[in-house]
Image (cartoon, grey):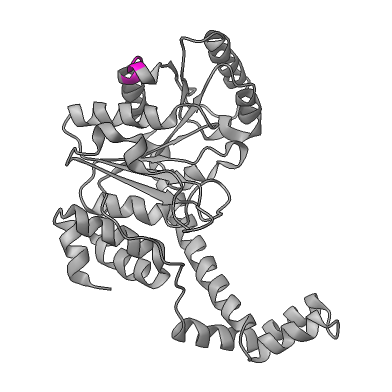
């Protein structure tokens, strides 16, 4: 990893920043080295996750919120986590298509990131990407998730505040609420509020919130918007900041939990990659796996044996010290 490239990104070079993003998506080794360099510069950004069912207008909402932030002079980063292309491994949707109003604004940096098949709708490196935008001086970072509905709960692991967007005509919205989105929301948005059923949906959300007796915190606010006409966006922006101030202690706890989860996931990912290399090699672990495949050994007993006698840990140590976990190459471009 070239430290000068990282320093150029920290100094405000947008092209260098785009290249650094490509590096952290491409290689775990680069991700590790880059995060080590940028970590001393982090700690100032506020991260807002925007999630909800597909078609809820999340991109339009994020664009409107970014405009409000820019009007206050805040530097903004936007991470749009999209489905993975089966051909290139990159994001299917492009940031230029969805965020044209901000593309030429030097105070806004937008990056599309592919989920790469990760459950929960978030890329594995989204947490690192948020910290990278924090390090380069972004005051506010928006993470817009892919919109996969009921599995989209991982946004809590990267965001300080979670905004759940819904639309009145989608019957799936209430199902999504029952599936867990109610628990992660700090702010609810009923978008496309000019359509029939908006008031009823807001009432349904309010009714479900009233049933929750597990917390003494104030219930999440519900904001009605027409994001394509910029209606309700200033009120939503203010609700997000008000919610941040009302949950100050909870924010600190959430940040600690998030860092712990990111550490745990990073360890698990590197161990998983090393294990995959062992299984494709010719060591004792690979030979044991082939004996399991042929039916000579029971899988659970074989696993217990190679753990108990230290074989697994010895081979993992060698694999981790000698190998690198390189992801499939993706196109490197400026955003």
Percent of width and height locating residue 23: 34, 65
Q: Is residue 293 magenta?
A: no
Left or right of 92? Residue 139 is left
In the figure, 195 relative to 70: above or below? above
Taking the spot 48% from the left edge, 81% from the top edge, the residue there is 320
Nearer to us in this view, 257 or 204 = 204
Q: Quadrant of residue 18?
A: bottom left
Specify the principal SS of the magenta part.
Answer: loop
Res. 245 visible in picture: yes
- Give the residues drawn in magenta, as a range: 229-233
Taking the spot 43% from the left edge, 47% from the top edge, the residue there is 158
Percent of width and height locating residue 221: 45, 20
Nearer to us in this view, 206 or 72 = 72
Percent of width and height locating residue 114: 46, 52
Q: Residue furthest right?
A: 295
Q: Quadrant of residue 65?
A: top left
Q: Residue furthest bottom?
A: 283
Percent of width and height locating residue 205: 57, 18
**Figure quadrant of the N terminus:** bottom left
Res. 256 visible in picture: no
Taking the spot 36% from the left edge, 60% from the top edge, the residue there is 331
In the figure, 301 relative to 45: above or below? below
């Amino acid at each position: 990893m070239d430290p000068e490239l990282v320093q150029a990104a920290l100094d405000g070079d947008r092209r260098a920043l785009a290249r650094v993003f490509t590096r952290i998506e491409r290689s775990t080794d680069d991700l590790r080295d880059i995060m080590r360099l940028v970590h001393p510069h982090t700690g100032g950004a506020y991260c807002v996750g925007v999630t909800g069912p597909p078609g809820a207008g999340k991109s339009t909402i994020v664009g409107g919120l970014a405009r409000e932030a820019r009007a206050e002079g805040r530097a903004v980063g936007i991470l749009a986590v999209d489905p993975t292309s089966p051909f290139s491994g990159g994001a299917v949707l492009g940031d230029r298509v969805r965020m044209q109003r901000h593309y030429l604004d030097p105070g806004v940096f937008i990056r599309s990131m592919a989920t790469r098949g990760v459950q929960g709708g978030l890329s594995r490196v989204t947490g690192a990407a948020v910290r990278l935008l924090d390090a380069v001086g972004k005051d506010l970072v928006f993470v817009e998730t892919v919109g996969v509905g009921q599995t989209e709960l991982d946004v809590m692991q990267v965001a300080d505040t979670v905004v759940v967007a819904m639309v009145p005509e989608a019957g799936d919205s209430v199902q999504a609420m029952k599936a867990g989105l109610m628990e992660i929301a700090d702010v609810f948005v009923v978008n496309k509020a000019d359509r029939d059923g908006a008031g009823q949906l807001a009432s349904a959300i309010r009714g479900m919130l009233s049933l929750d007796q597990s917390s003494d915190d104030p219930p999440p606010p519900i904001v009605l918007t027409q994001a394509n006409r910029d209606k309700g966006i200033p009120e939503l922006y203010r609700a997000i900041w008000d919610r941040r101030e009302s949950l100050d202690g909870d924010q600190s706890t959430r940040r600690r939990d998030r860092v712990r989860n990111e550490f745990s996931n990073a360890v698990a990912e590197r161990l998983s990659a090393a294990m995959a290399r062992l299984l494709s090699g010719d060591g004792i672990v690979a030979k044991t796996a082939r004996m399991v495949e042929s039916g000579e050994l029971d899988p659970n007993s074989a696993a217990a044996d190679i753990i108990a006698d230290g074989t697994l840990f010895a081979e993992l140590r060698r694999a981790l010290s000698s190998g690198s976990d390189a992801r499939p190459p993706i196109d490197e471009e400026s955003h």
